[in-house]
């Protein structure tokens, strides 16, 4: 592999913003159509009510809440890769964190829709925000639903700021040789950037603070989401294990999604010199580590449940998960999240893009099933046996679930054509030091 | 806005630029400025500027968020006394979630404002001569004022690719 020069690095990144080919438009069309169909399906609920869903007492949470938790989880690894690895000075992040950050912002934009979509009367969603009103009513700050509103809106704001602050120096590098509307776009994104020592002085300090804010935030957000369940008294939900279990699961699904996006992206945009096998190797190790933590959590909650007597509701719920109507979901989840990633122990598997892509797509399927398993089975099998009922999602709910994937990939495909997918400035810093270490100096014009 | 009078040198290697900055400072040139495509640590260390003022805006911002979060949750709960689940009206543990989120949110927004101010201040053409390659592939070292002849000599000795007088 040859090391790219500053100029060739810029040209490679600039080329990703070139005119898209037919494959791009086909992908954009499929994603847009899925999102539009999901939106139209949702309009049925708005016009005619929640009877279009499979929700019925006691299963009042189903696919839509599963989707919400899934997309919040996907959003996590972007901040992990960009902020947490920045604080730990893990240099391998430089080539991949921009895509992860974009993924985070678009995933939060997707996740944030769901609590609203799930409301019976979504036009009253603004009631969740505290605002002075004539009736002198205020929101109930002891409710996890309100915690979600604050956590998700803060996470969206901070991750969006973090993304665009990181883009500024790169947009300036592209601006100086761009023309037409792209020059205007890069000028806007560059935020008046000229690369002076005075600007870098403030920028590096502020970036450090953004990373320091984002790191606890990433842990808090999925902990808050886990408390949506854990603060209730339902068997299978009421557990102190939930926050770390949810955070580990979120990182697992998020990193798997980053790999799922990077493998085709690297090939389509010819980024082989920038996103190398080393990056995939490090991300695979992260998948392996978080899969081990998730497996440990699964085992722990089952073993804890089996500490109780045979009639204990907690134990009954876990037996139901493994042997009841939803048993295929449980075992498929275990296969995808616990068994599949163990193949990543082998370097030969980590080194094959198709194998990595397959494992990571299956992890994402498994992580969606994990959320379905948590959300649905506990409600379907609560403390009152006369109340038990199997929830089956309706076609409208499935359309909205696939529509969310369409919406996410639609945003991502557009974002990739407007925002540099690689951090040019940080890559230049790395290249200069590699060149200095090699004692060769930097070939800036090659 | 016309740039100040001075001499501008362009460098390909961060190490050479850092050496030039140190040499200029050793010769008594106090006002040495740099523009570069990435924050090369050796150049940043050679320039040796004091810590950014961002600290003094971000921390109060975060503290304002912390206090604001506590006041919002406590005062609104007292204004609308809704007892749920037998919990106290002012239940601090759940309020910690809101307070934390507001600390991060207001702190981040304050950080952004401070950064915007810093970028605006450091991006004025008067501060540094405009040159598109400083965002691309070279490092510019600009010494304002002083004896142009001696500055040119130092820059060339340090390995400058190009040396020009400005202003």
Image (cartoon, coloured by chain):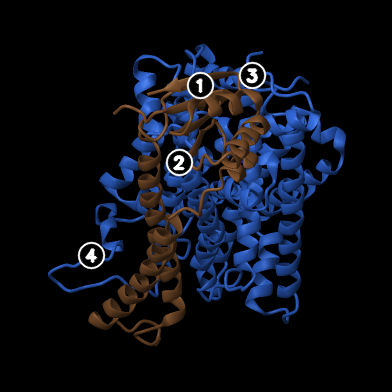
Chain colours: A blue, B brown
Tag 1 residue: B133
Q: Disc 1 vs disc 4: which is toward the camera?
A: 1
Labels 3, 4: one chain: yes
Tag 2 residue: A199
Residue toward you, B74 or A306? B74
Q: Are marks 1 and 4 in contact (CB under 8 Å)?
A: no
Q: Are marks 4 and 2 in contact (CB under 8 Å)?
A: no
Disc 3: CA contacts within 10 A as few (<14), some (14-19) or many (>=20): some
Q: Is residue A70 above or below residue A178?
A: below
Q: Mark 3 and mark 4: span between their CA atoms?
A: 55 Å
In the image, residue A54 lies at what x, y percent?
A: 44, 51
Using the rendered view, name the quadrant where residue A143 is placed: bottom left
Tag 3 residue: A444
User: Which structural element holds mark 1?
Assistant: helix
Q: Mark 4 and mark 2: span between their CA atoms?
A: 38 Å
Whichever of labels 3 and 2 marks the residue nearer the N terminus, that label is 2
Tag 4 residue: A131
Q: Left of A153 or right of it: where is A236?
A: right
Labels 1, 4: one chain: no
In the image, residue A233 lies at what x, y percent?
A: 53, 76
Q: Disc 4 vs disc 2: which is toward the camera?
A: 2
């Amino acid at each position: 592999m040859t090391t790219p020069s500053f100029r060739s690095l810029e040209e490679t990144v600039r080329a990703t913003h070139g005119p898209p080919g037919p494959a791009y438009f086909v992908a954009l069309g499929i994603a847009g159509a899925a999102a539009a169909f999901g939106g139209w399906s949702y309009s049925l609920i708005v016009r005619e009510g929640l009877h279009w869903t499979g929700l019925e007492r006691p299963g009042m949470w189903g696919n839509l809440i599963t989707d919400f938790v899934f997309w919040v989880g996907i959003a996590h690894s972007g901040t992990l890769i960009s902020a947490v690895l920045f604080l730990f000075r893990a240099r391998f992040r430089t080539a991949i964190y921009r895509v992860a950050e974009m993924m985070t912002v678009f995933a939060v934009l997707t996740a944030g829709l769901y609590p609203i979509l799930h409301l019976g009367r979504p036009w009253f969603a603004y009631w969740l925000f505290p605002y002075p009103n004539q009736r002198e009513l205020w929101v109930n700050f002891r409710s996890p639903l309100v915690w979600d509103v604050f956590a998700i809106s803060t996470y969206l704001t901070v991750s969006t700021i973090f993304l665009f602050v990181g883009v500024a120096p790169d947009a300036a590098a592209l601006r100086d040789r761009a023309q037409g509307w792209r020059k205007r776009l890069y000028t806007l994104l560059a935020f008046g950037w000229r690369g002076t020592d005075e600007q870098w002085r403030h920028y590096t300090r502020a970036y450090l603070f953004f990373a320091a804010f984002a790191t606890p935030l990433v842990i808090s957000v999925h902990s808050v989401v886990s408390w949506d369940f854990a603060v209730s008294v339902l068997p299978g939900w009421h557990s102190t294990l939930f926050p770390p279990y949810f955070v580990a699961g979120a990182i697992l699904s998020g990193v798997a999604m980053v790999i799922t996006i990077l493998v085709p992206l690297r090939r389509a945009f010819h980024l082989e010199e920038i996103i190398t096998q080393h990056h995939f190797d490090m991300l695979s190790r992260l998948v392996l580590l978080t899969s081990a933590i998730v497996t440990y959590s699964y085992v722990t909650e089952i073993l804890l449940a089996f500490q109780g007597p045979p009639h204990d509701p907690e134990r009954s719920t876990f037996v139901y998960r493994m042997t009841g109507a939803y048993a295929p979901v449980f075992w498929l989840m275990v296969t995808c999240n616990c068994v599949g990633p163990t193949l990543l122990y082998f370097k030969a598997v980590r080194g094959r893009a198709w194998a990595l892509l397959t494992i990571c797509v299956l992890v994402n399927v498994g992580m969606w099933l994990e959320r379905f398993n948590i959300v649905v089975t506990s409600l379907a099998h609560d403390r009152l046996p006369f109340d038990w009922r199997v929830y089956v999602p309706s076609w409208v709910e499935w359309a909205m679930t696939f529509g969310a994937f369409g919406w996410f990939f639609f945003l991502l495909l557009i974002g990739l054509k407007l925002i540099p997918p690689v951090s040019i400035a940080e890559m230049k810093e790395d290249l200069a030091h590699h060149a200095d270490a090699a004692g060769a100096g930097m070939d800036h014009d090659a | 806005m016309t740039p100040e009078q001075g001499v501008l040198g362009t460098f390909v290697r961060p190490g050479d630029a850092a050496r030039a900055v140190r040499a200029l400072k050793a010769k008594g040139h106090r006002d040495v400025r740099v523009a570069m495509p990435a924050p090369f640590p050796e150049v940043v260390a050679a320039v040796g500027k004091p810590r950014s003022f961002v600290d003094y805006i971000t921390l109060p911002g975060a503290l304002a968020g912390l206090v604001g979060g506590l006041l919002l949750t406590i005062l609104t709960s007292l204004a609308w006394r809704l007892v749920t689940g037998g919990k106290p009206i002012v239940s601090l543990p759940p309020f910690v979630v809101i307070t934390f989120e507001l600390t991060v949110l207001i702190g981040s927004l304050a950080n952004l404002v401070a950064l915007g101010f810093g970028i605006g201040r450091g991006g004025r053409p008067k501060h540094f001569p405009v040159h598109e390659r400083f965002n691309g592939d070279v490092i510019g070292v600009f010494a304002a004022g002083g004896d142009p002849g001696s500055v040119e000599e130092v820059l060339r000795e340090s390995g400058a690719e190009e040396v020009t007088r400005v202003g």
